[in-house]
């Protein structure tokens, strides 16, 4: 058999054996006998490939690509006899430097490949970088030889999801975690049993694309430590997992460690959603560094004003030009790559309203990127979740271009549950709307409750413990004069600001926390729980802890003992959600459709059955449905007033009695019961405690 001639070099440049490369796919590709490199730039007049020894960092002879190695706006070269595990690489681009015209090429800059599969330079979290390094982020090649051992996605229906928003490092970094590989992907695997006991079947990971924790780092005179880019919402490389989150990052094995984590989560029946940041990059505004996109093709990759400055709809200095065909293609390719190569189950898109803007910042009626992502066959089974607003004021909650695919973080659920929780008057109707899946936002457009990701807290804001412990933010430790962070927290400190040893205050805060959790897991839609809320994690009132790699953000695992009451309650209410299909139905309930046991799908009540009082601080409802296992009916009541109230419960058919499943006014071991094992009520009026909530279900007499 003859050997293909295109496996051989056609010429030699700077001592390297090369041939014109294949322009597709972009990025690095292993080929027979070498590596193919392909890079886009519509403005480059010249392009060079720079190679470095991986171990020493020494620059190897630079490969200046002839014009014949360019097809259209793509430069490509195949380099032979190149050991993919022994080098790093970058690019040098010559082209116009005319900021007013939108061009910022710099032939002195060594540029990172936007499609780098792994990146070195920040291999060990927190290791002080060499700020004088002209090429601080170097691209690596990654062998695609991981053994998935038959891994398959759990493919959990959206109605059955319980999402846990978490930070990879913060989950196990605290010494109390006892993880052998604290703060890493491997450490997360060690703590999967906690997620399973809690009832979690989906984790939503804060950004894991490569970022620089030292971006805009600065000494903090108030804490004596260094403020870091802890959250990671500032991407360096979209195709590369964060090396500093890997126990093996210094060995260049972060990709395999990440995949091992996903495989272990899937084996436990837990899906993986990534929080992705396509709205901006780490290059900032016109004062920022030229790391990759700016030097390659600034005008293509970013939204620019007519004067050549950066539109800043992200609040982070620039806005990625996502609906430009080239950028759109890169984003879609990135999503497909993480699904196919890393077996990711879904994505939460940060500040997703930007993804619907045109190159001049205007909102588009039919954004090509969002339509393409929704219809993409590789992404067909992915969960797609939008944060449906941005820092430029575009607020699309309920109106996000969804194409029948995108769910939304429901900010109204967060705000209106908080208002009811703190006892605001005339909020009962708003809460009722949120509990049934926010039909005011989604029903008219034909979307059901699963369009709503319900949450009360998330990484961005107070934790649940702080929500009931602070009236105002306390972000002094950020060293920004407490000016950063949201002032609209809709919180209540239960009488004392911050920590308290008063037993009445601590008991009320615990009850308020349980009220919030019970409402979250009763409501139609997909619930999302913030890491640590199940055990009372506090940030000391800081509602913008983006810069603290410290115990402020780390999960203190000793709370599993000190807050065992709350942890047990959280496990219990999640178990009740899993047990009651009526809480997880994908349609908005209607009062004019039959449910079960004589109740319609939804009925509203007050102190007396069928008599809701929307001017009060009481909401009471019955969800009812016939399911494959028989009648599924629950009664939920929440009293946010400071006084108890008597309830006459709705009548059940003969032979049925209400049983107690949860009562936040009760002490541990009596506040929540396993499904079907709660005590039967005697049919008399029920005293619902002040600022407390209950969940009941009917049971037929034995």
Image (cartoon, rainbow, N blue to C red):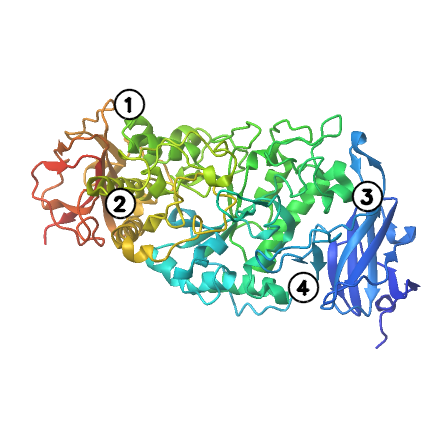
Q: Earlier in the sequence, mark 3 or mark 2?
A: 3
Tag in front: 1 or 3: 3
Q: Secondary structure at mark 1?
A: loop
Is the C-beta separation of discs 3 and 2 under 8 Å?
no
Distance from Cα at disc 4 to Cα at disc 1: 58 Å
Numbered circle sitting on residue 536: none
Q: Secondary structure at mark 3?
A: loop
Please name the residue that numbered disc 2 is placed on: 626
**Other residues around mark 2 within 10 Å, as few (<14) / some (14–19) / many (≥20):** some
**Other residues around mark 3 within 10 Å, as few (<14) / some (14–19) / many (≥20):** some
| Foreground of the two, 66 or 580 | 66
Please name the residue that numbered disc 1 is placed on: 426
Residue drawn at x 41%, y 53% as measured from the top left: 555
Tag in front: 1 or 2: 1
What is the x, y in percent for residue 380? 55, 49
Q: Is residue 140 left or right of residue 156?
A: right
Residue drawn at x 46%, y 58% as measured from the top left: 173
Distance from Cα at disc 2 to Cα at disc 4: 52 Å
Is the C-beta separation of discs 3 and 4 under 8 Å?
no
Please name the residue that numbered disc 4 is placed on: 142
Which quadrant would the C terminus be assigned to in this image? bottom left
Numbered circle sitting on residue 106: 3
Q: Earlier in the sequence, mark 2 or mark 4?
A: 4
Q: Secondary structure at mark 2?
A: strand
Distance from Cα at disc 3 to Cα at disc 2: 67 Å
Which quadrant would the N terminus be assigned to in this image? bottom right
Distance from Cα at disc 3 to Cα at disc 4: 28 Å
Distance from Cα at disc 1 to Cα at disc 2: 33 Å
What is the x, y in percent for residue 471? 35, 32
| Foreground of the two, 576 or 182 | 182
Q: Is residue 342 visible?
A: yes
Tag in front: 3 or 4: 3
């Amino acid at each position: 058999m003859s050997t293909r001639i295109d496996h051989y070099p056609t010429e030699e440049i700077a001592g390297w054996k090369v041939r014109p490369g294949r322009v597709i796919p972009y990025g690095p590709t292993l080929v027979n006998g070498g590596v193919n490199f392909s890079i886009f730039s519509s403005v480059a007049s010249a392009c060079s490939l720079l190679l470095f020894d991986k171990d020493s960092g020494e620059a190897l002879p630079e490969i200046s690509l002839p014009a014949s190695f360019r097809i259209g706006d793509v430069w490509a070269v195949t380099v032979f006899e190149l050991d993919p595990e022994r080098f790093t690489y970058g690019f040098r681009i010559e082209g116009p430097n005319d900021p007013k015209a939108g061009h910022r090429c710099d032939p002195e800059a060594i540029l990172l490949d936007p499609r780098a599969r792994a990146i070195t330079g920040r291999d060990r979290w927190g290791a002080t970088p060499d700020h004088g390094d002209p090429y601080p982020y170097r691209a690596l090649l990654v062998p695609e030889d991981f053994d998935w051992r038959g891994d398959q996605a759990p493919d959990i229906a959206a109605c059955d999801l319980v999402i846990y928003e978490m930070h990879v490092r913060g989950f196990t970094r605290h010494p109390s975690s006892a993880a052998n590989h604290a703060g890493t992907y491997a450490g997360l695997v060690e703590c999967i049993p906690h997620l399973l006991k809690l009832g979690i079947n989906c984790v939503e990971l804060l950004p894991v694309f490569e970022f620089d924790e030292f971006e805009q780092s600065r000494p903090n005179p108030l804490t004596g430590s260094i403020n870091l880019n802890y959250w990671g919402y500032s991407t360096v490389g979209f195709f590369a997992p964060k090396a500093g989150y890997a126990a093996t990052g210094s060995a260049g094995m972060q990709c395999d460690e990440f995949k091992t984590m996903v495989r272990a989560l899937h084996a436990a029946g837990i899906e993986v959603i990534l929080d992705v940041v396509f709205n901006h990059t780490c290059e900032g505004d016109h004062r920022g560094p030229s790391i990759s996109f700016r030097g390659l093709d600034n005008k293509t990759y970013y939204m620019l004003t007519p004067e050549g400055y950066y539109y800043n709809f992200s609040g982070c200095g620039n806005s990625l030009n996502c609906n430009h065909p080239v950028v759109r293609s890169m984003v879609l390719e990135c999503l497909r790559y993480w699904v196919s190569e890393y077996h990711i189950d879904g994505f939460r898109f940060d500040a997703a309203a930007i993804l619907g803007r045109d190159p001049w910042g205007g909102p588009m009626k039919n954004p090509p990127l969002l339509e393409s992502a929704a219809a993409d066959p590789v992404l067909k089974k992915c969960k797609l979740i939008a944060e449906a607003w941005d820092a430029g004021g575009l607020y699309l909650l309920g109106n996000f271009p969804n194409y029948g695919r995108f769910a939304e973080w429901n900010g109204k659920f967060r705000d209106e549950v908080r208002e009811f929780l703190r006892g605001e008057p005339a909020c009962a109707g708003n809460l009722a709307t949120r509990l049934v899946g926010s039909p005011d936002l989604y029903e008219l457009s034909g979307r059901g409750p699963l369009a709503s990701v319900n949450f009360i807290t998330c990484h961005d804001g107070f934790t649940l413990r702080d929500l009931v412990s602070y009236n105002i933010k306390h972000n002094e430790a950020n060293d920004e004069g407490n000016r950063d962070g949201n002032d609209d927290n809709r919180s209540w400190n239960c009488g004392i600001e911050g920590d308290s040893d008063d037993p009445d205050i601590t008991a009320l805060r615990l009850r308020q926390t349980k009220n919030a959790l019970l409402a979250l897991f009763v409501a139609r839609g997909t619930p999302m729980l913030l890491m640590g809320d199940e055990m009372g994690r506090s940030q000391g009132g800081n509602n913008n802890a983006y810069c603290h790699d410290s115990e402020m953000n780390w999960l203190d695992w000793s709370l599993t003992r000190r807050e065992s009451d709350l942890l047990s309650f959280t496990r219990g209410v999640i178990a009740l959600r899993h047990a009651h299909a009526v809480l997880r139905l994908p349609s908005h309930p209607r009062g004019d459709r039959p449910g079960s046991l004589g109740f319609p799908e939804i009925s509203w009540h007050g102190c007396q059955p069928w008599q809701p009082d929307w001017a009060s601080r009481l909401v009471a409802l019955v969800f009812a449905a016939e399911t494959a296992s028989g009648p599924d009916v629950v009664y939920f009541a929440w009293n946010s007033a400071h006084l108890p109230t008597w309830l006459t419960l709705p009548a059940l058919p003969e032979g049925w009695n209400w049983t107690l499943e949860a009562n936040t006014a009760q002490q541990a071991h009596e506040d929540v019961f396993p499904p079907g094992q709660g005590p039967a009520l005697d049919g008399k009026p029920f005293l619902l405690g002040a600022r407390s909530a209950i969940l009941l279900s009917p049971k037929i007499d034995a």
